[in-house]
Amino acid sequence: MKTKVLLTLIAVLLLAFSVKAQKGIRIGYIDMEYILENVPEYNEASADLETKVQKWKVEIEAELKGVEEMRKELTNEKVLLTKELIEEREEDILFKEKEILEYQQKRFGPNGDLFIQKKRLVQPVQDQVFVAVQEVAKNKKYDFVFDKSADVVMLYSADRHDISDQILLRINRASKRKQINSKKEKKALERAEKRNVDQEKEVTDRERATSEKQAERAKLLEERKAVRDSIRSAKKKEFEARRAKLLETQKRKRDSIQGLKAQLQNKKETPSDEGDENENEKN
């Protein structure tokens, strides 16, 4: 298959060179894998699919472990079982292994869930890439555009012919058009669409640098706030400790004063009682 594609490519190039020998020829290529890696929607969906794949693998491993346990139990109990029971247990194990194999095929086979869902995942991006390639090729007057990551083998490719970033830029702008909610956003996108890849990269780098500075400043402010909060908390605890100590001291003083008052009151009352008793004895 690759040989046929390569021969077709060579034939096309020879024809192009013969037709445009004097005018020159413009050839571009894209890297589909690179584009896919930089499309956020694809990455999110791909991460969700990977989560499913890991879940399927865990389920299969658990089932295989169960079969292994069944085999061990049969080996250990063989001497206690009749021939009929041994055959029945072996049939159960074979049936379980067949179920696991069918499940593996259902999930990971040539036409399994993984293949189908990957195809569904890639197809929308491939469609966007195809549309973007048509636009870029016509606007930039490319004669041919190839996919570097596909079956076509490229023995040499100069970086200046790589239009993957232009395709990615078109896809991202098309995605942003769908998310526009205001005139301000629309004007900002219109300004952005007038920039080429290098200009867009320069703007993106500036925005990233600004964002990083803002994040660094926010982190610094957060650290300063944490220090202030820590100092404030320490001062509050110290104040509360002093206040509690002062209240305790005041309480002890009040208790001491009340104790003295009680003693004085008792002394005053005691002589009066003795006088009344002596008066009673005289009578």
Image: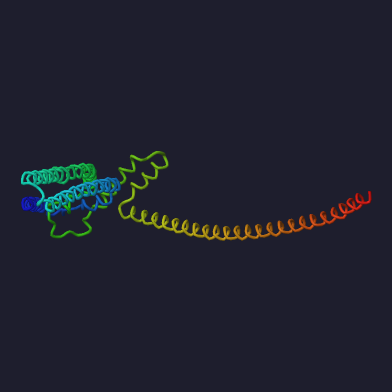
* Residue 231 image point, x, y percent: 57, 61
Quadrant of the rendered image containing residue 102: top left
Where's residue 88, x and y in %? 9, 43
**237 to the left or right of 85:** right
**Residue 196 as seen in the image, left or right of residue 104:** right
Q: Which sits in the foreground, 213 or 97?
A: 97
> Residue at image x 41%, y 57%?
212
Q: Does 279 appear above or below 123? A: below
Residue 18 visible here:
no
Drawn side of residue 50 relative to residue 214, left or right: left
Q: Position of residue 200 (x, y in %)?
A: 34, 52
Q: Residue furthest right?
A: 283
- What residue do we see at 24% from left, 47% from top? 55
Quadrant of the image occupied by residue 257: bottom right
Q: Nearer the viewer, residue 72 or 81?
A: 81
At a point 79% along the width and 54% down the height, the residue shown is 262
The colour style of the image is: rainbow
> Residue 15 placed where, x, y %?
8, 51
Q: Is residue 137 above or below residue 154?
A: above
How many numbered discs sit on the rendered protein? 0
Q: Is residue 187 visible?
A: yes
Please state which of residues 60 and 88 is positioned toward the viewer in this rendering: 88
Question: Where is 210 relative to 98, above or below?
Answer: below
